[in-house]
């Protein structure tokens, strides 16, 4: 059993508080992804689990055993580094066997384990080569293989794919996911790429950066990927998850009818959002949020007038950047396939109430009334 | 035309440099092959191949002992310098601690004292340890000047090794000693060979300490032995013997450099490309 429990974990380098009050449970066999903007301490948190950094305060247990003062090699964890960190002077076999040799394993057992790991990663033919004779993707496999042979309870990945090209990244991502299914070990994966986070994770841990770390603690939100997507707890999470990021429109709460909030935008139009805003009162400053993929063009109810300022054609979809009166940033609309919108066109944006998010003045979310469902397009009323 | 002139000037300069650096040694070889009064005629090419000088160097004094002493002392200095250099470099290059910069500066500062300045103090120290006229005394005193540059070069090299490599080894369960021996040392061969070679040459050629700290002919190292070669009378300097001895002591160093030169170069280029 290799479940990880963190209680009030803090880490400070001299006076700089990098990690604050992290409470986190990762169950045995779970795939957790640490994600966050650069400088949020996600790698540091991983290194605390690995034991490469000392925990300043708080308690961490792995498999029920307190590990605060346990050296890395005895925690039952294995780490895959961003730069692979293969030993350049050793063959692939020796690279993978190094840890086992240090642990004084029987040489027959070492051989079996290395070949077993090499077979899983389909690189048995590479065992006699040196790291410099391998391509980037192959080196990455060796780094993963080096972790596998130790049969750890927990795998730690520190941005393992960031040195690979795009095609290889997708392929390796799928392999890691498959590996997780096959081995059934717990995995912690650090990335700044939210596609990796969304696709791999059972549980995403989104970390705060900057001032919010001290004010709210390091963790912004913990949950399954789709929960973070559909029910972000605050503006920061809403803006971080999703690409392009969620559109934010400033407004004032105009009233609450039948449990649905009506928001007055700067240009005077009123948009309704299906959220529970009972804690707010009419006249409060709020922020309306809606994802680009949930905005549709057309007419009818709950619409906003906008002018096209820029269009990006991606082939499978198009991003229309529009200007809404009184809103500083562009409101982005994602259209399936091509679009014939041109710069300067006037559009009517439909913001369906069930897809609207609403945040109070402090940036906290009013709970959405509608449970998220997997639909590609919002249903028009 | 201008190109041709540049070409000529370049190679003329090269020739001058080669002549300047190689000629003294070449002339020593030529002289060592002469016998008797032939020594005093100026010839640029060996006319006779007379090996008598080489034989008499070994017959007239314990030159074989001196050679053995030099080999022992130099090898011991290299081994100890590299051992202390690597372990110190690990601490200075990889471990964070207060006063690290100051310590490095002090190490460098030690190497700035001229040998003469520490000679008398060193003499008392050697005698206090009971190492006067003992090869071990030479080994210890030589490390005064070999350790500073060994430590500095290896520290710089050690500092540039990727941190992840060390962390990967830690995750694999290696202790600091295993990290040094099994991970870092194999990567540091070029630096180890270079510093080892420099330490060897410095110890091999050292004269002042060797002269001061030894008494008997059988404990002397080669440079001192050569300087103290005397002829039949005090008015006669046996140039032939001296030249022969000089050629004998120079050859090992030249051979060592030639052997390791290729190693150094290949090692440096192999390390330069990200592996």
Image: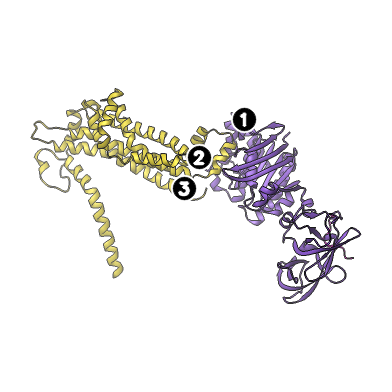
Label 3 Cα neighbours within 10 Å, binned few <14 / some 14-19 / many ≥20 = some
- Residue B11 image-quadrant placement: bottom left
In this view, B264 is above or below B217: below
Q: Position of residue A239 (x, y in %)?
A: 72, 58
Q: Is residue A13 visible?
A: yes
Q: Quadrant of the N terminus of chain B?
A: bottom left
Residue A377 colored magenta? yes
Q: Which residue is tagged 1?
A: A108
Q: Position of residue B16 (x, y in %)?
A: 24, 55
Q: Which residue is tagged 3?
A: B270
The residue positioned farthest toward the right in the image shown: A258
For the record, the magenta segment spans A372-381
Left or right: residue A222 versus residue A53 is right
Chain identifier, colour yellow: B
What's the residue at 59%, 30% (across, down)? A103
Q: Main secondary structure of the magenta part?
A: loop
In this view, B131 is above or below A148: above
Chain assignment, label 2: B
Q: Which residue is tagged 2?
A: B96
Camera-near label (1 vs 2) is 2
Q: Do the dots labelled 2 and 3 sit on one chain?
A: yes
């Amino acid at each position: 059993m290799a479940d990880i429990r963190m209680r009030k974990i803090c880490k400070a380098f001299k006076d700089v508080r990098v990690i604050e009050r992290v409470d986190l449970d990762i169950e045995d066999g779970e795939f957790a992804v640490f994600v966050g903007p650069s400088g949020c301490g996600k790698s540091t948190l991983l290194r605390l689990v690995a034991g490469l950094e000392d925990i300043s305060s708080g308690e961490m247990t792995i498999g029920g055993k307190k590990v605060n003062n346990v050296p890395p090699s005895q925690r039952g964890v294995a780490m895959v580094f961003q730069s692979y960190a293969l030993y350049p002077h050793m063959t692939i076999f020796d690279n993978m066997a190094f840890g086992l040799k240090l642990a004084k394993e029987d040489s027959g057992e070492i051989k079996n384990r290395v070949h077993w790991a090499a077979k899983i990663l389909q690189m048995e033919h590479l065992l006699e080569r040196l790291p410099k004779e391998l391509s980037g993707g192959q080196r990455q496999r060796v780094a993963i293989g080096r972790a596998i042979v130790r049969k750890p309870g927990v795998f730690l990945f520190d941005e393992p794919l960031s040195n690979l090209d795009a095609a290889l990244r997708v392929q390796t991502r799928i392999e890691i996911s498959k590996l997780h299914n096959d081995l059934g070990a717990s995995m912690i994966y650090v990335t700044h790429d939210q596609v990796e986070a969304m696709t791999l994770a059972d549980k995403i841990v989104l970390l705060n950066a900057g001032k919010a770390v001290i004010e709210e603690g390091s963790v912004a939100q913990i949950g399954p990927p789709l929960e973070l997507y559909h029910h972000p707890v605050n503006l920061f999470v809403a803006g971080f998850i999703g690409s392009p990021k969620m559109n934010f429109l400033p407004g004032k709460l105009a009233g609450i009818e039948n449990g649905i909030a009506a928001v007055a935008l700067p240009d005077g139009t009123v948009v309704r959002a299906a959220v529970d805003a009972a804690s707010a009162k009419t006249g409060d400053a709020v922020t309306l949020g809606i994802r680009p993929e949930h905005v549709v063009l057309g007419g009818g109810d709950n619409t906003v007038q906008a002018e096209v300022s820029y269009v990006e054609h991606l082939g499978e979809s198009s991003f229309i950047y529009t200007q809404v009166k009184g809103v500083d940033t562009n409101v982005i609309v994602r259209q399936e396939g091509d679009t014939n919108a041109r710069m300067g066109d006037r559009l009517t944006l439909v913001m369906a109430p069930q897809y609207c998010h609403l945040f109070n003045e402090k940036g906290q979310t009013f709970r959405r009334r509608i449970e998220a469902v997997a639909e590609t397009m919002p249903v028009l009323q | 035309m201008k190109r041709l002139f540049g070409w000529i000037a370049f190679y003329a300069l090269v020739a001058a440099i080669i002549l300047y650096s190689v000629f003294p040694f070449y002339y020593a070889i030529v002289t060592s092959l002469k016998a008797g009064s032939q020594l005093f005629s100026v010839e640029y090419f060996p006319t006779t191949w007379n090996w008598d000088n080489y034989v008499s160097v070994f017959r007239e004094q314990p030159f074989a002992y001196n050679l053995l002493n030099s080999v022992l002392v130099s090898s011991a200095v290299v081994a100890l310098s590299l051992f202390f250099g690597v372990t110190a470099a690990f601490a200075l290059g990889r471990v964070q601690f207060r006063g690290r910069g100051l310590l490095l500066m002090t190490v460098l500062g030690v190497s700035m004292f001229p040998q003469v300045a520490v000679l008398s103090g060193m003499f008392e120290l050697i005698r206090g340890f009971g190492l006067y006229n003992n090869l071990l005394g030479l080994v210890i005193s030589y490390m005064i000047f070999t350790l500073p540059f060994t430590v500095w070069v290896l520290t710089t090299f050690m500092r540039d090794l990727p941190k992840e490599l060390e962390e990967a080894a830690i995750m694999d369960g290696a202790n600091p000693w295993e990290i040094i021996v099994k991970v870092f040392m194999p990567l540091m061969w070029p630096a180890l060979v270079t510093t080892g070679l420099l330490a060897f040459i410095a110890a091999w050629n050292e004269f002042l300490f060797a002269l001061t700290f030894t008494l008997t002919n059988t404990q002397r190292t080669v440079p001192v032995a050569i300087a103290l070669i005397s002829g039949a009378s005090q008015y006669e300097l046996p140039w032939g013997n001296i030249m022969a001895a000089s050629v004998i002591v120079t050859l090992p160093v030249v051979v060592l450099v030639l052997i390791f030169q290729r190693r150094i170069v290949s090692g440096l280029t192999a390390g330069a490309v990200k592996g």
